[in-house]
Image: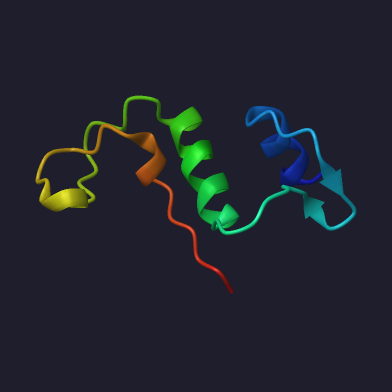
Amino acid sequence: MSIDWHISKVLDIASLSNKGLFIKGYGMDYGFWIAYNLGRVLYPNGDGKTITGRNGSKEPETDGGYLINNVWV
């Protein structure tokens, strides 16, 4: 079973294709959307130690969505 199936269940995405997750839409970076929402599920209150520097903050990140990085290859 691929990781796509698990992600689709965690994020409540009903659509899977033979190529992986299938998300309808346009004009949005869905790779970021998946990484951000998966981070919010895994770390709902942040991790209490990672500092992302988002918006110039020096405090630990409280939004788990920013704790997972995504990169297009």
Q: Residue furthest top?
A: 45
Rendered position, 26 above or below 43: below
The percent coordinates of residue 70 (x first, y second) are: 49, 58
Residue in the image at 32% along x and 34% along y: 63
Question: Can you say which quadrant of the picture contains the C terminus?
Answer: bottom right
- Give me the residue at 73% from left, 48% from top: 24
Along the horizontal axis of the image, is 67 left or right of 57?
right
The picture places residue 23, in percent across and down from the top left corner, at 72, 47
Extreme residue toward the right, this view: 18
Q: In the rendering, at what x and y percent does residue 49 appear?
A: 21, 37
x and y percentages locating residue 53 in the rendered image? 18, 52
The answer to whether 31 appears left or right of 25 in the picture is left
Between 48 and 13, the residue placed more toward the observer is 13
User: Left or right: 62 with respect to 29?
Assistant: left
Left or right side of 58 for 68:
right
Name the residue at 11% across, 52% down: 56
Total numbered badges shown on the rendered structure: 0
Quarter of image, res 64: top left
User: Quarter holding the N terminus?
Assistant: top right
Residue at 57% x, 59% y is: 27
Coloring applied to the structure: rainbow
The correct choice, above or below, for 56 with respect to 63 in the image is below
